[in-house]
Image (cartoon, rainbow, N blue to C red):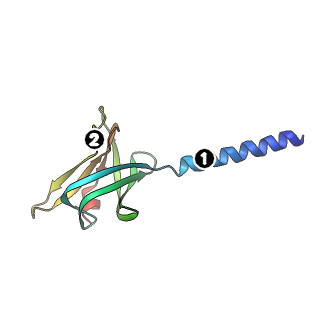
Amino acid sequence: MKISRMLSLLFGAALLFASAAIAGETNKSSVQLEDKVIVEGKALTGKYTVEWSGSGPTVQVTLLQGKQTVATFPAHLTEQPNTNPQDAYSTSTAPDGSKSLTAIYPSGKHFFLQIDQNQARR
């Protein structure tokens, strides 16, 4: 009786730790912004770590420079048939000539992060 209780407790603890590890998992990539790109009202250039989390097609994206969060915004995870050969991004140009981030393409993935223009320009 004690052995079965002990095994149940041990199994429950293992399951709890495994689910916590999965729930805390984030996806990461990096992006080198060669152009001055407007994200959340900030002009960004340089290398950034891109992290996204969430379930379903809508995810929360965070841009980090080192350990500092530079921008956080929602995006739509859009599937595509081929993998991205390298980390990349796309922009749109406003009438005033400024560029806004429209998508991030993580290397080796079969999807890209499509950014809502209204969210990215704020």
Q: Residue furthest right?
A: 1
* Left or right, residue 57 beside residue 4: left
Which label number is shown at residue 19?
Answer: 1
User: Is the residue under label 2 in contact with that under label 1 (CB below 8 Å)?
Assistant: no
Point out residue 54 in the picture as x, y percentages from the top left corner.
Answer: 45, 51
Foreground pick, 107 / 91: 107
Residue that sits furthest to the top in the current view: 81
Q: How far from the left and from the top, in percent, is residue 15?
A: 66, 44
Judged from the image, the secondary structure of the residue bearing numbered disc 2 is loop
Tell me which label, 1 or 2, sits earlier in the chain: 1
Dot 2 corresponds to which residue? 86
Of discs 1 and 2, which sits in the foreground? 2
Q: Position of residue 83 (x, y in %)?
A: 31, 35
Q: In the picture, which quadrant includes the C terminus?
A: bottom left
Q: Residue type at mark 1?
A: Ser
63 displayed left or right of 35: right
> Total number of numbered labels?
2
**What is the C-alpha distance between the residues marked 1 and 2?**
31 Å
* Residue type, numbered disc 2: Gln
The quadrant the N terminus occupies is top right
Query: Residue at image x 9%, y 61%?
Result: 95
Query: What residue do we see at 84% from left, 43% from top?
Result: 5
